[in-house]
């Protein structure tokens, strides 16, 4: 099975990586690509400052599910709203549910409980693909929030399951941890830039996924590469030598960091170019073509 | 005016992840040392190359390490680590060694305390406060944690005080469990077992016991903690504390930058210069129309230069007035030695001076 087919067969694809690597763009491109091959895809964004809709050229979600293309939907998710929704669901008396949600103890619990928000988001995604909501989708592509540790989203259920070790919440955490650990249902796409810190973070994240969770990412996408340089004997146009020097330094850094990443990661790797386009549907379309070609190339090789 | 602008006892470098805060903080530190200030840079997560350039290793996790550079002032670097700082805090406020050990041994502390929301952020300002009180430095530069919601750390003292004062703690501190680890005060054995069984089914008794033990072990520390959090809060709003807001280039970063600027001002902080970092140069028109083997790269760079200029202009227009807004050009290679870091620091100072004039 090619990487593209494998991704398309999954129920949840988590797009993760350090802040600033273009995670949201990658999630949008991936969502469009998977919808294009026939899957019904829900794109989930967790950042309160919505930006996915701008890329896709649709109005903001404001928490609702909105259509963003054929077989493609978009939703901006607030973990707090999901948790409050769960309380309303579990507590049948609206008055009591309202009291619980309004109490300061609950507020601090939601703000402070480790792993709770991550669990709420992942749980929401799981229920969406299990068909528990009005909108029936085949899979969810999750634009994971940028955190210091890109892995905290993925490891939260496991940590929580270990810490709690029993009860309904523990069982829920264990259920989610099992789901994330299962590469046939849940995929991890790791976004990176071919620059020092993002590559460092990618290497650390790969090690963590391998060692602690025994599940390497499905694919590593290296985003925003500068184009290859012309042959050394070509002469730059008049007055543009400094620009060409900047370009070649950036490209050299890209190649050096790619090599470093390659020495630690032998699995599927996709390279995407930095395109001279503003964020929006045209950029997504350009990247989607490249991504598809790269994934097909990977499939043919494996 | 630039000298006065960055010559403050406390500089906090804030901004989204990946915009180059850490490198700029180090550059500002070197420049300050060159100008004669006894300077400390506190940072979270420097790249290996930056650590190498500064010559600081793991030792800097426990204490400030002096950078080997010949300047009129001095430059020390401390690496921040939430767990180390938290442990230190526990030691300081625990009534005795046994109480501290009880906390360290608690599984809840071990597994989860480091992940509690805001702890990392709080620990950053906590360390900052320690250093400020010591008064060993003319200038302390804090590179803030690498989170998108980097402002969380500013709210951390308020959040901790809020938590300590909330009912959650009163509930947690009740003596719920007896010596054998069973729930206390349950009337009849059978009923008691029933309730325990129910709680066990929902959240798990093990977690509840660990948590209760943790909060009880922690209780003697709370007053010290609360007092300290209020002082930290005041320090962040002191007249000598200035925020340097670092932004990435390009229009798509503007909402982030404006959001930070507004939040800082609303929360009563002093917003200093806004630095648009890693800006691409604007190229001559020939670049955009280049043909041949150089076309692809030159078209891209022409676009990036144009994009960053547009971003700067829009940001300038959207800012309400007095803020100093300067750009720092993208360095062809990231500064990885002391000389290039210092050059970057000088460049920033020069741009601020030019802006003021």
Image (tube, grey):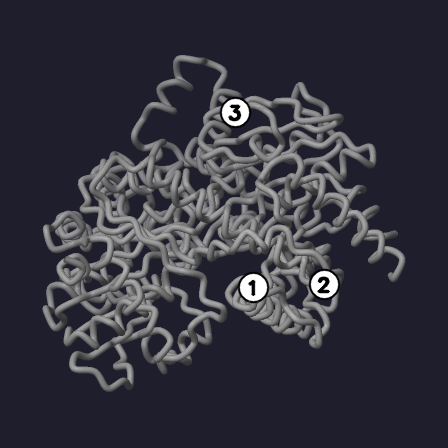
Of residues B138 and B128, the one drawn nearer to the viewer in this rendering: B138
Report the residue at 40% width, 41% height from top. Answer: B256
Residue B100 location, quadrant: bottom left
Residue B110 % position (x, y): 40, 60
Which circle, 3 or 1, is nearer the viewer? 1
Question: What kind of element bears circle 3?
Answer: loop
Report the residue at 58% width, 47% height from top. Answer: A23
Read off the residue under disc 1: A240
* Residue A114 in the image: above or below residue B86: above
User: In the rendered view of the protein, which quadrant contains the C terminus of chain B?
Assistant: bottom left
Of residues A65 and A254, the one drawn nearer to the viewer in this rendering: A254
Read off the residue under disc 3: A63
Local packing at callout 3 (Cα closer than 10 Å; few below 14, some 14-19, many 20+) is: some
In-image side of B267 versus B256 (left or right): left
In-image side of A143 versus A197 (left or right): right
Label 1 marks a residue whose chain is: A
Label 2 marks a residue whose chain is: B
Instruction: Tell which circle, 3 or 1, labels the residue nearer the N-terminal end.
Output: 3
Of residues A116 and B140, the one drawn nearer to the viewer in this rendering: B140
Local packing at callout 1 (Cα closer than 10 Å; few below 14, some 14-19, many 20+) is: some
Q: CA distance from mark 1 to mark 2?
A: 13 Å
Question: What kind of element bears circle 1?
Answer: loop
Of residues B198 and B9, the one drawn nearer to the viewer in this rendering: B9
Residue B216 % position (x, y): 26, 51
Read off the residue under disc 2: B293
Report the residue at 67% width, 62% height from top. Answer: B294
Label 3 marks a residue whose chain is: A
């Amino acid at each position: 099975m090619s990487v593209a087919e494998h991704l398309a067969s999954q129920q949840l694809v988590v797009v993760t990586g350090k802040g600033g690597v273009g995670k949201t763009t990658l999630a949008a491109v991936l969502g469009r690509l998977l919808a294009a091959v026939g899957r019904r895809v829900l794109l989930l964004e967790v950042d309160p400052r919505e930006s996915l809709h701008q890329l896709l050229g649709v109005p903001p979600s404001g928490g609702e599910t909105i259509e963003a293309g054929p077989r493609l939907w978009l939703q901006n998710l607030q973990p707090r709203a999901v948790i409050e929704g769960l309380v309303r669901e579990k507590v049948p008396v609206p008055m009591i549910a309202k009291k619980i949600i309004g109490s300061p103890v609950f507020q601090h619990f939601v703000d402070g409980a480790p792993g709770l928000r991550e669990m709420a988001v992942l749980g929401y995604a799981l229920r969406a693909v299990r068909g528990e909501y009005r909108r029936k989708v085949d899979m969810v592509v999750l634009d994971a929030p940028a955190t210091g540790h890109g892995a905290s989203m993925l490891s939260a259920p496991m940590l929580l399951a270990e810490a709690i070790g029993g009860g309904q919440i523990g069982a829920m955490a264990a259920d989610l941890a099992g789901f994330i650990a299962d590469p046939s249902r849940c995929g991890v796409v790791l976004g990176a830039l071919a620059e020092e810190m993002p590559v460092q973070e990618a290497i650390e994240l790969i090690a963590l996924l391998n060692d602690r969770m025994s599940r390497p990412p499905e694919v590593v996408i290296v985003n925003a590469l500068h184009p290859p340089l012309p042959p050394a004997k070509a002469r730059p146009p008049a007055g543009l030598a400094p620009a060409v020097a900047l370009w070649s330094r950036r490209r050299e850094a890209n190649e050096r960091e790619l090599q470093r990443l390659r020495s630690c990661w032998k699995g599927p790797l996709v390279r995407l170019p930095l395109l001279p386009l503003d964020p929006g549907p045209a950029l997504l379309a350009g990247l989607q073509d490249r991504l598809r070609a790269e994934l097909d190339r990977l499939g043919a090789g494996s | 005016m630039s000298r006065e602008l960055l010559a403050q006892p406390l500089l906090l470098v804030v901004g989204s992840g990946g915009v180059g805060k850490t490198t700029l903080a180090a550059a500002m530190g070197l420049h300050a040392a060159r100008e004669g200030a006894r300077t400390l840079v506190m940072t979270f997560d420097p790249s290996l190359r930056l650590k190498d350039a500064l010559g600081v290793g793991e030792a800097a996790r426990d204490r400030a390490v002096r950078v080997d550079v010949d300047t009129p002032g001095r430059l020390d670097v401390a690496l921040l680590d939430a767990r180390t700082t938290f442990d230190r805090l526990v030691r300081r406020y625990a009534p005795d060694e046994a109480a501290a050990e009880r906390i360290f041994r608690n599984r809840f502390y071990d597994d989860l305390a480091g992940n509690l929301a805001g702890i990392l952020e709080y620990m950053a300002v906590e360390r900052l406060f320690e250093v400020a009180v010591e008064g060993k430095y003319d200038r302390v530069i804090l590179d803030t944690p690498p989170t998108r919601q980097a402002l969380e750390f500013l709210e951390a003292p308020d959040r901790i005080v809020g938590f300590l004062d909330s009912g959650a703690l009163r509930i947690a501190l009740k003596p719920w469990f007896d010596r054998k680890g069973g729930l206390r005060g349950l009337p009849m054995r059978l009923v008691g077992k029933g309730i325990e069984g129910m709680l066990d089914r929902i959240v798990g008794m093990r977690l509840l016991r660990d948590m209760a033990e943790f909060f009880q072990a922690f209780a003697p520390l709370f007053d010290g903690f609360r007092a300290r959090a209020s002082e930290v809060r005041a320090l962040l709003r002191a007249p000598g504390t200035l925020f340097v807001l670092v932004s990435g280039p390009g229009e798509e970063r503007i909402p982030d930058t404006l959001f930070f600027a507004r939040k800082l001002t609303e929360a009563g902080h002093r917003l200093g210069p806004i630095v648009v970092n890693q800006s691409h140069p604007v190229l001559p028109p020939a670049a955009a129309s280049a043909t041949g083997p150089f076309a692809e790269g030159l078209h891209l760079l022409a676009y990036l230069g144009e994009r960053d200029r547009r971003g700067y202009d829009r940001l300038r227009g959207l800012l309400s007035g007095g803020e100093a807004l300067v750009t720092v050009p993208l360095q062809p290679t990231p500064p990885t030695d002391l000389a290039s870091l210092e050059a970057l620091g000088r460049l920033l100072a020069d741009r601020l001076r030019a802006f003021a004039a």
